[in-house]
């Protein structure tokens, strides 16, 4: 029996190298966990039929090649990442029959080192949501308490890592979709710097915000995956490399806490847990001080203008003409209406209509144009803050995982889930959620996370502080 | 905002909606727009939008890309002799 619970990439790599177990045996152990749990928890939309074949190739690499740390490591991918020849539906009915015609750049990189892509995980339709309740294929249940949501939109990927359906996973993060579900599922989720990971082959939602991010049980696992998938890509003109010189701010290590963001709407137990985390961090040589981010409270309202605007443009392509579901109408234009009416779920329709509204003549200036300017002010707040502090710390979420059905009929309540996570997307900054304790609810211990935000391309600082915190959190 | 506005937006976005959906979306949209409208309070007269467009060029030369022609064609909802078939436009 392989001890999946305590397995890390580095441990697995060592065991694969020493011959303690093979990559085939390793993937079989994860497949067994999926088989036992998937019916109840609905984490994987599909386990790839060639997973064992991929593991066989990895075993060959260990016998006679130069294995990478990720060789033979079972990784799950969110259902919006293209893997050639495999189904990919973005959690939507409109793509239920769609097979990827090329590999996304991240999948190419995983294949390049013979990682084992085990399956595709459930998600909110087109990554729009914070609970996976918007998936056309049913909600994923939180492994800690199946009456609760796993968070979202990468809820399938975080639940997979939490239950041991894969050692690591990929998600995507547009407003918090790697970090919020990581917090709800008790795992680590990274939102990398905007542009640091290629989005070629990621089904687009909000193109000025989307980024692919790794999910794992430990900061070290997330770091290893990030280092593999990062980098400039000529297939994604928004991808970029870190600037050569990164401004260092002196020697004193300072973490800032934006208290103005925590005044209301936050669970008192989450806040108490957050204060405890701060006290622990202080023991490791960090100074923690309050900071002001005057406009950060406008992140969510401006996010829910900018994002729907980009969604209304990006999702226009799903028209039933070239691929995906096609519904026949009386003429070509009718085909569009019928296909979209049938293929898109409620939240997707909601956001397309909001986006259409805020971009329409007469409303553009008051909404979209205004929101892009508010976005600049938020970015400026962070820029000024990072002249005084190295990192910014917040809780990841306002509460622990909520009940399935609790918020599904109230979109604004759902949107407020993003209050701590959306600022990093609006500014392109990297951020990481790390498990930081539990909140007891109904006899169950529900995990909660804390979030560190760093300057652009300073993921290394996130990994460093994250590993420090992992050592002292218990 | 009333049901006519929802119908107009749905027409612009080319989405067929049932009457029940229109009613539900009207309520949702009213709530969402009321919530996001709070950004009105922010003073932005002196502020420029954050987005700074830039050109990204690459050499204009033909290169083979890794995609499956077969998979693309096999997924056309309608086709003829390997071409995508669409309804007449005019």
Image: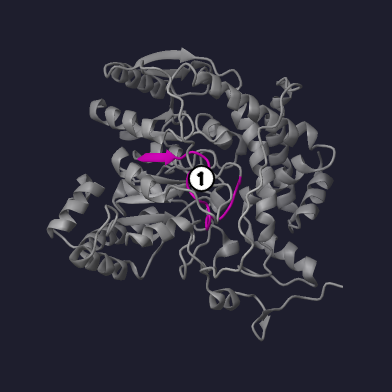
Quarter of the image that includes the C terminus of chain B: bottom right
* Range of residues picked out in magenta: A188-207
Q: Residues within 10 Å of mark 1 (few under 14, many from 20)?
A: many
**Name of the residue lying farthest toward the right:** B90
Position of residue A335 measured from the top left corner of the image (x, y, whole percent): 74, 68
Q: Position of residue A426 (x, y in %)?
A: 58, 34
Give the x, y percent position of residue A425. Answer: 54, 36
Q: Residue furthest bottom?
A: B81
A16 on left or right of A466: left
Pointer 1 residue: A211
- Which of the pair A119/A124 is nearer the observer? A119
Residue A272 quadrant: top left
Give the residue at x 74% y 59%: B16
Residue A379, by quadrant, is: top right
The prevailing secondary structure element of the residues shown in magenta is: loop
Q: Is residue A472 visible?
A: yes
What residue sits 79% from the left and 34% below the top? A365
**Side of A15 where A57 appears, left or right:** right
Total marks drawn? 1
Quadrant holding the N terminus of chain B: top right
Q: Is residue A1 something one can see in this rendering?
A: no
Which residue is rendered at x = 16% and y = 57% of the image? Answer: A17
Colouring: one colour
Q: Is residue A85 left or right of residue A116?
A: right
Task: Name above or below for residue A442 compared with residue A258.
Answer: below
Q: Nearer the viewer, residue A408 or A327?
A: A327
Residue A403 point in image, percent of width and height = 45, 39
**Identity of the residue drawn at 74% across and 24% down:** B40
Quick one: SS at disc 1?
loop
Question: Does A194 lie within the magenta span?
Answer: yes
Q: Is residue A186 magenta?
A: no
């Amino acid at each position: 029996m392989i001890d999946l619970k305590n397995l890390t990439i580095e441990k697995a790599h060592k065991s694969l190298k020493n011959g303690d177990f093979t990559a085939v045996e390793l993937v079989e152990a994860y497949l067994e966990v999926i088989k036992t749990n998937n019916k109840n928890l609905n984490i994987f939309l599909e386990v790839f039929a060639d997973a064992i074949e991929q593991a066989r190739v990895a075993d060959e690499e260990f016998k006679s090649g130069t294995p990478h740390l990720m060789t033979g490591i079972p990784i799950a991918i969110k259902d919006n990442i293209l893997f050639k020849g495999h189904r990919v539906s973005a959690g939507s009915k409109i793509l239920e029959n769609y097979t990827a015609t090329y590999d996304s750049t991240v999948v190419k990189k995983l294949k390049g080192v013979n990682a084992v892509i085990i399956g595709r995980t459930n998600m909110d339709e087109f990554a729009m949501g914070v609970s996976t309740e918007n998936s056309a294929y049913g909600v994923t249940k939180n492994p800690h308490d199946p009456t609760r949501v796993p968070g979202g939109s990468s809820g399938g990927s975080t639940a997979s890592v939490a239950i041991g359906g894969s050692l690591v996973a990929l998600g995507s993060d547009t407003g918090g979709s790697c970090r919020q579900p990581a917090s709800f599922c008790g795992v680590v989720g990274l939102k990398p710097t905007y542009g640091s990971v290629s989005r070629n082959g990621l089904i687009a939602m909000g193109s000025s915000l989307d980024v692919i991010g790794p999910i794992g049980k430990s900061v070290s696992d997330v770091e290893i995956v990030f280092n593999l998938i990062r980098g400039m890509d000529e297939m994604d003109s928004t991808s970029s490399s870190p600037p050569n010189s990164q401004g260092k701010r002196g020697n004193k290590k300072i973490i800032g806490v934006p208290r103005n963001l925590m005044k209301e709407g936050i669970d008192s137990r989450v806040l108490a847990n957050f204060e405890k985390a701060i006290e622990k961090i202080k023991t490791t040589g960090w100074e923690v001080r309050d900071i002001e981010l005057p406009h950060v409270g406008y992140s969510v309202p401006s996010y829910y203008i900018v994002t729907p605007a980009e969604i209304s443009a990006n999702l226009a392509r799903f028209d039933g003409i070239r691929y995906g579901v096609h519904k026949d109408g009386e003429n070509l234009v009718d085909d569009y209406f019928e296909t979209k009416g049938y293929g898109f779920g409620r939240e997707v329709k909601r956001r397309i209509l909001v986006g259409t509204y805020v971009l329409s003549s007469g409303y553009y200036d008051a909404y979209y144009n205004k929101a892009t300017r508010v976005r600049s002010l938020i970015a400026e707040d962070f820029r000024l803050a990072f002249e005084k502090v190295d990192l910014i710390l917040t809780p990841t979420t306002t509460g622990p995982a909520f009940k399935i059905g609790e918020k599904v009929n109230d979109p604004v309540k759902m949107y407020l889930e993003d209050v701590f996570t959306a600022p990093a997307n609006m500014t392109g900054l990297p951020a990481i959620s790390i498990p930081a304790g539990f909140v007891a609810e109904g006899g169950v211990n529900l995990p909660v996370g804390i979030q560190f935000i760093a300057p652009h391309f300073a993921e290394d600082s996130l990994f460093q502080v994250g590993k420090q915190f992992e050592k002292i959190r218990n | 905002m009333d049901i006519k506005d929802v119908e107009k937006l749905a027409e612009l976005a080319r989405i067929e909606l049932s009457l029940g959906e229109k009613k539900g979306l009207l309520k949702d949209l009213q709530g969402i727009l009321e919530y996001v409208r709070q950004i009105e309070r922010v003073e932005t007269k002196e502020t420029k939008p954050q987005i700074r467009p830039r050109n990204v060029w690459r050499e204009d030369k033909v290169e083979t890309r890794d995609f499956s022609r077969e998979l693309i064609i096999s997924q056309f909802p309608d086709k003829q002799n390997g071409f995508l078939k669409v309804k007449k436009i005019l």
